[in-house]
Amino acid sequence: MQNTISGFSKLKKAEKIDWLLSTYFSDNVNSRTTITQYWNTDEKLQKLHDEFIENTISNFYLPLGVAPNFLINDQVYTIPMAIEESSVVAAASKSAKFWFDRGGFKAKVLSTTKIGQVHFTYHGDTERLRRFFNIIKPKLINETSHITKNMERRGGGILDIELKDKTNELDNYYQLHVTFETLDAMGANFINSCLEQFAKTLTNEAQEFKTFTSVEKDIHIVMSILSNYVPDCIVRAEVSCKIEDLKDKDIPNPKAFVEKFKQAVSIAEVEPHRAVTHNKGIMNGIDAVVLATGNDFRAVEAGVHAYASKSGRYSSLTHCKLTEDTFTFSMEIPLALGTIGGLTTLHPLVKFALQLLGNPSAKDLMKIVAVAGLAQNFAALKSLTTTGIQKGHMKMHLMNILNQFEATNAEKDAIVNHFKTNTVTHSAVVEAIKALRNH
Ligand code: MEV
């Protein structure tokens, strides 16, 4: 077949690039430069990145920005954010500043339980399986002791193992549903190692269980894997203040503002199309901090969106409450994060980001990340219900358009100045560049 290759992963990096360039690119020289200009001159650092994944050919940069002035539980943070979208860090910073003057954010971890499952099939009497499970449960736990001893010394480990009969949903399907406390580790490797050991013990013990028929002894493991749905690993973030204190240059009438703001949240609570975009805005903040701190943003995304659908209808993650005189805006989300293990000690920028946050515990990081999400949503809804989103968004996007046109520093200064008093649209910027260059 055209363009296929076998043994690619075994080639040297230079050979991989040669193959790519000769197979897919006609302008070999330019494409090679595109790849190599992102290589780090520090060979050790480059090797570190090369070895994070297979078949590394270059590094893919994202800007690392910071949003200062986040007051969370009376402590001030500067939050690191890795993200490409122009307006996200600016919005976070704006929201942080706004709430800094109004008591800041409050955040609380409500639970920290992680979940893993051994999925298996069993053909036979369910009651006999249950008796078998109750007998071998201590052994299931004991036989993981070589994996759990360090975690247990620190106060974590396996919380419980349940046998779940899922045969109503799928013929012969059962689970070991296991709960874990993984403390400051995200725990994926720990959980998966425990699960694979449970699977071994389960099948071995079944073979030896005298009262099983020969068919019953033949338990088949389908898979052993953690769940990224962690509805018992929840953090709550909240802002609240007197309605009259919300007054600022964009909120001349706080009472009218909160009514409209609440309406916007209510729409996201009942309307899935809006809820997805509303929650996407929350994830702008969450993913950026999750990524900067070396955590698995895909796991967080999957888990958060599943949680947003827990009622059976996809809905808003944030909620707004109004009393006669008080505005409260809050969110509860599942976040399985780690501040030890994984990339946290390997990636120099991740280490830096965690240091910037004062080397938080996983619980503290959960609070910080949730606050970044809530702040982002507040900023988006504030803009959407007052000035409209494009004003701030295009202001930040202006630099991208100027870079597309390879504007010089002098041209950038002149055009940024021009748009201080004019509305930024793509065509208005193009016109302004043309006018400047024809001058
Ligand atoms: C854009 O990245 C995010 C927003 O669309 C979020 C929202 O609509 O709430 C502005």
Image (cartoon, grey):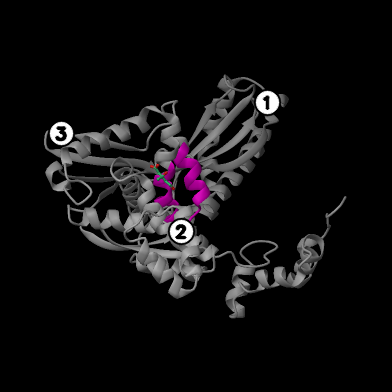
> Residue at the spot x=31%, y=31% of the render?
266
Along the polypeptide, which appears first: circle 1 or circle 2?
1
Majority secondary structure of magenta residues: helix
Instruction: Assess whether mark 2 and mark 1 are in contact (beta carbons under 8 angstroms).
Output: no
- Magenta stretch, residue numbers: 280-305
Q: Could you say where residue 74 lies in the image, as x and y percent from the top left?
A: 20, 58
Q: How far apart are marks 1 and 2 (CA)?
A: 72 Å
Q: Name the residue under label 3.
A: 323
Farthest front residue in view: 439
Q: Name the residue under label 1.
A: 216
Q: Which amino acid does label 2 sit on?
A: Val
Q: Name the residue under label 2.
A: 429
Along the polypeptide, which appears first: circle 3 or circle 1?
1
Q: Could you say where residue 437 lies in the image, as x and y percent from the top left?
A: 50, 69
Instruction: Assess whether mark 1 and mark 3 are in contact (beta carbons under 8 angstroms).
Output: no
Q: Which amino acid does label 3 sit on?
A: Thr
Q: Could you say where residue 269 lies in the image, as x and y percent from the top left?
A: 36, 30
Element type at mark 1:
helix
Q: Does the magenta stretch include residue 382?
A: no
Q: Residues within 10 Å of mark 3 (few under 14, many from 20)?
A: few
In this view of the protein, which residue sits in the foreground, 139 or 15? 15
Is the residue 292 above or below the residue 43 in the image? above
Q: Distance between the residues labelled 3 and 2?
A: 44 Å
